Image (spheres, rainbow, N blue to C red):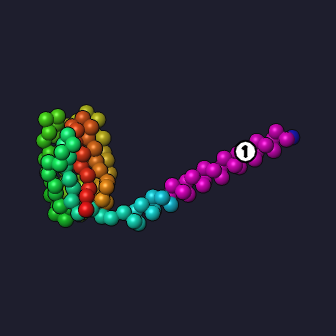
Amino acid sequence: MDGVKNGKKRIRNDILLAVSVLVLAVALIIAYRAFSKSGTYAAVIIDGKVTATYPLSENAEHVIETKHGRNVLCIKDGKASVTDADCPDLVCARHHEVSHSGESIVCLPHRLVIEIRE
């Protein structure tokens, strides 16, 4: 019988641990959103060098050409996203919109980073 009690206790403790981790994760996400500052511009970084900056206050679409490929940066309603790319994995195009300082979209095949800054 002790084995059954220990098994139930272990399951209960595992559930408590999982719920605690989930609550902590949600709290950290809420705190990040509440305290992070909205960015004012998107910096385009190619091979580690800032090649262009675009204000988030102006809706626009910019084609970014690198020696490795092409990406389309769309700025709309204060948010930046990559809407099209010719890289094989398209991770950058599937990335969510970014608007807070410090957020970024990365396209590794094109050695491109789009970073939101203040």
Position of residue 15 in the picture relative to residue 1 (left or right):
left
Query: What residue is rendered at 31% in x and 47% in y?
Result: 95
Count residues near mark 1 (Cα–Cα under 10 Å), then give few for <14, some for 14-19, many for 20+.
Answer: few
What span is colored magenta in the figure? 2-26
Image coordinates for residue 55, horizontal then vertical, percent: 17, 61
What's the magenta bit mostly, secondary-structure-wise?
Answer: helix
Residue 24 lies in what quarter of the image? bottom right
Q: Is residue 114 above or below residue 39?
A: above
Residue 54, can we see it?
A: yes
Image coordinates for residue 7, horizontal then vertical, percent: 76, 41
Residue 72, can we see it?
A: no
The residue indicated by pointer 1 is 10
Type of the residue with mark 1: Arg
- In which quadrant will I find the N terminus? top right
- The residue lying toward the viewer, choosing from 101 and 74, is 101
Query: What residue is rendered at 30% in x and 64% in y?
Result: 38
- The residue lying toward the viewer, choosing from 108 and 95, is 108
Secondary structure found at label 1: helix
Image coordinates for residue 64, horizontal then vertical, percent: 14, 45
- The residue lying toward the viewer, choosing from 27 and 59, is 27
Name the residue at the right extreme: 1
Q: Is residue 102 above or below residue 49?
A: below
Position of residue 86 in the picture relative to residue 100 (left or right):
left
